[in-house]
Amino acid sequence: MLRKTYIMLAAVSFIALTSCTEDFLDNKPTNAISAEDALSTPANMDLLLNGLHRQMYAQNPLPGTASSRSGQSYYMPSFDAIGGNIIHSSRGNGWGRADLQWLAHTNANSTTVDNLWYERYHFVFTANSIINRVAEGDLPETAELNNILGQAYAYRAWAYHQLVTTFAKGYLIGSPSTDLGVPLVLDTGAPYTSAPRATVEAVYTQVEDDIKKSIEFFENATAPDNKSNISINAAYGIQARIALSKGDWQTAADAAVSARDGFELLDESDWLSGFNTTDLSEVIWGGHVIDTETNYFQSYFYFICSTFNGSQNRSNPKIINKEVYNNIPDTDYRKKAWLPLAPNTNSSASNGQGGSFETDPNYDNADDFWDEWESIISQYGMTTGHNTHPYMSMKFLQKNPGTIDPDDVIYMRASEMVLIEAEAKAMMNDITGAQDALALLGEARDSAFDKTAFATQADLMDQIKFQRHVELWGEGFSYFDHIRWDEGLDQTNSGASEVLYGDGFMQEKPSLNDAWIWKIPQAEINANPNISEADQN
């Protein structure tokens, strides 16, 4: 019954709160309660929020979207594939190939751009419905209601920030007062004609206002009982991300410190345990995946984890950039999370060196080649159908390896907040402050870390970039990092195959290259009278 109620309430948001395009208006479920009832009490509003918590990782599609591109489970690894941090070792079964080849986000008709747009606007309109209902003023102010409002404002800020940082030019490399952003729609109800594209500056003004209000409500709210819910710490983390992308360095540093308050950095054992649970000490925000509602072959671990028993992973283990890995000191325990000498057992590996010891330069006889493969399969609990590949990732490990069982999805960790503080202070030329922040992470990971080795802004930024590549590998940040740092793509020495990667092998830096900006979905242009072909990126 609880699950049925949950689904019904989520369906209400599909009626009244989904996309602003006309295509979605006919998708009225036959068994849903009214939107009025769904918003009648804080308890019902909380169930609507539960629908958003699940949508962050679930495979169940919104009307008009595809389950294969659902929530952060898909888009975190997609952002890292586009940004070049996750490298595919073969063509696999096709997942993500268009993304890494830069054929998806540059195509207005692709499922990748379509789903990101409509899913994020689903979050916006659900948040709008709650915020505007409470604004009517007939509900008593309580700690419970403040928690609901804190989450609603935070979700709206998060969703609009995701939209403006993908479908518009980066704030730091463009002209935000005139660059086109995305439609700002804050009302609730018909006629759902949406709005024209607001400027990037206007969108940022809105998200900054929303996240400030979120934090204010959380200060007088009940604390969440689950990390799937947005908490005041997660709201500060969202504020830190917004400020970092804008270059508001002081706000970024301050918010990052507040976000990680109470969340201890992982020790070696926990860091190497597989990132499969929100119970880890430094997880601030993440999706607790319910066993009975598994995502199967649209789960985050299907896209990212070498042990998952899916065709994507058996044939195409994801690898780290060789240059990045080779710069990890031997005294840094994170080096154990990738296997540089794993035998290349896939005859279809994109580097042309797979299939046997005769083609793999790391081996000179069949016994050593296959013994090492067997050792890896046994140690990590993979199946005999899994291939291995040099530099393959073992950062993400299932609780039950070799299966399709669900695992949690982590959206925000304290380590990210440490790196945000370090970067913000480095950009303010606060050398000592940046060194101290960087040392929090560096000394926790590397027994020989010496913060004094990074004595200039340039040296600090080089180290911060390296730390983000290693610490946050696979967590969906590299696309946004490239834009903020205005750095292009060059996969020449990464281990990626130029034949496989195509356009994604090398790209000019974002300030000179509008291909970094995602195309507005063609379906939105067709249906929204306020956006024309002239407004396309």
Image (tube, helix red, strand yellow):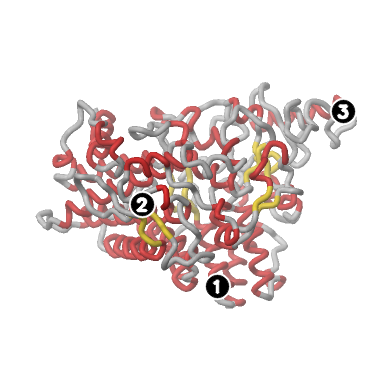
Mark sitting on residue 358:
3
Inspect the image, locate mark 2, and give the three-letter code of the amino acid beneath it: Ile
- From the top left corner, tell me how far across and down residue 61 is, in percent: 38, 33
Q: Residues within 10 Å of mark 2 (few under 14, many from 20)?
A: many
Q: Is residue 507 left or right of residue 480?
A: right
- From the top left corner, tell me how far across and down residue 532 is, in percent: 37, 48
Inspect the image, locate mark 1, and give the three-letter code of the amino acid beneath it: Lys
Q: Residues within 10 Å of mark 1 (few under 14, many from 20)?
A: many
Q: Tell me whether the residue at label 2 lies in contact with that at label 3, contact meaning CB atoms closer than 8 angstroms.
A: no
Tell me the element at label 3.
Answer: loop
Q: Is residue 522 left or right of residue 517?
A: left
N-terminal-most mark, 2 or 3: 2
N-terminal-most mark, 1 or 2: 2
Inspect the image, locate mark 3, and give the three-letter code of the amino acid beneath it: Glu
- From the top left corner, tell me how far across and down residue 460 is, in percent: 65, 69
Q: Residues within 10 Å of mark 3 (few under 14, many from 20)?
A: some
